[in-house]
Image: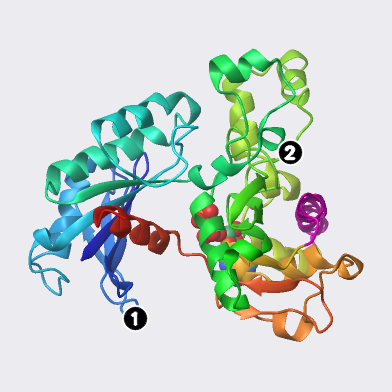
């Protein structure tokens, strides 16, 4: 079966086509600047080849998908002979609220539930829904499957997901911690168990997803029991442009004392803060590492604060789990930055975390065990593959599993 994985954003449509169950990538790419000037499709069928570019006006997501499907089927070097080979479409959906603790076949009820969660993810769920609708229209014979970023964290106990606010805010408005990046945390935890050669159900794992967005998760026997992102993806770790944890009175200060309105505060905390705000120069960890090395003091301080925040969470989640069998670094920063990995675990040997400096040095984008001899906890670098996780789920649902 061929499985198409779609991640629809407000002006973009990312895709990856898999041959399943072989888990072979047949094509990948994205449509960008949908509805804007300069819209184009970038894709390739062979990771070794350069991306092909198709530049043309793409006014909406339906046209974007039709361009993708045209490239995948029938054209020059196309991986498909017929679109009917696509048995399932796996959609990344950001917010499933409390309605979804697992992947779901998209029925009209499921679609209505995704729609009902728009207030919790106003920027993400609407384009996700759009992706579902255009895919159903274009591929009526394929099972449409929703894989939620929040689903893995539905196992959090109330003491971890409730904010200390009047209870009716949870009861009437679903104000609580949801957590995100669930597909990635689940994927790397599963892979860590394979690498350790032990059942996931026997293990306690801390997974650190460090990308542009970043979150950390305590995984107990395969279930998420705490995670750093909250009701929205703003809480927790310091991210590229998001502040992470903050005194909740601070937005009030910005409004009352500095006269900002809610939209300005939103923009400041989500787009102008984090590593960009602290360094005053960039949200890109590579640039910050280079600048710090060249003596840029604010870049160095930003990196220090970044690692310090992660370390605090590792301490907290070690306490949550009691003992930890493995810690996993993943996503752009976690997979590629030896500097960040070393800084995060610095001084944690007495707590049971020590990485092997040699094994860590220069390690980029590749799976590896970088545990130092004598470290109680295994230290692993595992590239995440959310698309593959979605493809596996979509296939399982399409086959009725
Ligand atoms: P997204 O959340 O957009 O999926 P990614 O997981 O791709 O993000 O991570 C993007 C981040 O990874 C960027 O901040 C980038 O600086 C960082 N990154 C990528 N390669 C390296 C590297 N070699 N060293 C340090 N950071 C890196």
Colour theme: rainbow
Location of residue 244 with respect to 360 vertically, above or below: above
User: What residue is pinned by disc 2?
Assistant: 245
> How far from the left and from the top, in percent, is residue 377?
77, 71
The residue lying at 71 percent from left, 47 percent from top is: 280
Location of residue 359 with respect to 328 vertically, above or below: below
Q: Which residues are magenta?
A: 296-323
Location of residue 177 with respect to 74 vertically, above or below: above
User: What residue is pinned by disc 1?
Assistant: 48
> How far from the left and from the top, in percent, is residue 234?
62, 38
Do we see residue 59 in this rendering?
no
Quadrant assignment for ligand 1: bottom right
Q: Is residue 300 magenta?
A: yes
What kind of secondary structure does the magenta stretch mostly adopt? Answer: helix
Q: CA distance from mark 2 to mark 1?
A: 40 Å
- Tell me the quarter of the picture where residue 390 sits: bottom left
Q: Is residue 83 magenta?
A: no
Q: Nearer the viewer, residue 72 or 317?
A: 317
- Tell me the quarter of the picture where residue 210 sits: bottom right
The residue lying at 10 percent from left, 59 percent from top is: 84
User: In the shown orientation, is residue 60 left or right of residue 207?
Assistant: left
**Nearest to N terminus: mark 2 or mark 1:** 1
Task: Say if disc 1 is inside 8 Å of ligand 1.
Answer: no
């Amino acid at each position: 079966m061929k499985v198409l994985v779609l991640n629809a954003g407000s002006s973009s449509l990312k895709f990856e086509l898999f041959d399943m169950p072989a888990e072979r990538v047949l094509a990948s790419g994205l449509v960008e600047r949908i509805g804007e000037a300069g819209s184009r499709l970038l894709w390739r069928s062979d990771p070794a080849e350069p991306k092909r570019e198709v530049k043309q006006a793409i006014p909406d997501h339906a046209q974007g998908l039709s361009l993708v499907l045209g490239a995948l089927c029938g054209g020059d070097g196309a991986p498909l002979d017929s679109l009917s080979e696509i048995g399932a479409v796996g959609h990344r959906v950001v917010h499933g609220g409390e309605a979804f603790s697992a992947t779901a076949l998209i029925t009209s009820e499921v679609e209505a539930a995704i729609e009902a969660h728009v207030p919790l993810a106003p920027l993400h769920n609407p384009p996700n829904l759009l992706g579902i609708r255009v895919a159903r229209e274009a591929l009526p014979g394929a099972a449409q499957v929703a894989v939620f970023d929040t689903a893995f964290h539905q196992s959090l106990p109330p003491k971890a997901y409730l904010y200390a606010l009047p209870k009716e805010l949870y009861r009437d408005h679903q104000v609580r911690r949801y957590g995100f990046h669930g597909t990635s945390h689940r994927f790397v935890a599963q892979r860590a168990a394979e690498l350790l050669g032990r059942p996931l159900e026997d293990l306690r794992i801390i997974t650190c997803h460090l990308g542009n967005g970043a979150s950390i998760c305590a995984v107990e026997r395969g279930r998420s029991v705490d995670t750093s992102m909250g009701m929205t993806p703003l809480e927790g770790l310091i991210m590229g442009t998001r502040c992470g944890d903050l005194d909740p009175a601070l937005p009030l200060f910005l409004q009352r004392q500095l006269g900002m309105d809610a939209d300005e505060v939103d923009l400041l905390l989500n787009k102008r803060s984090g590593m960009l705000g602290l360094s005053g120069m960039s949200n890109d960890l590579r640039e910050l590492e280079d600048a710090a090395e060249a003596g840029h003091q604010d870049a160095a301080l930003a990196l220090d604060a970044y690692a310090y925040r992660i370390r605090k969470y590792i301490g907290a989640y070690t306490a949550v789990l009691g003992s930890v069998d493995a810690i996993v670094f993943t996503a752009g920063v976690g997979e590629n930055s030896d500097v960040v990995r070393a800084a995060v675990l610095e001084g944690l040997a007495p707590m049971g975390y020590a990485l092997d400096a040699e094994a860590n040095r220069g390690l980029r984008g590749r799976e590896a065990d970088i545990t130092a001899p004598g470290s109680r906890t295994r230290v692993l670098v595992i590239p995440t593959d959310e698309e593959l996780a979605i493809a596996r789920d979509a296939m399982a649902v399409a086959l009725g599993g």
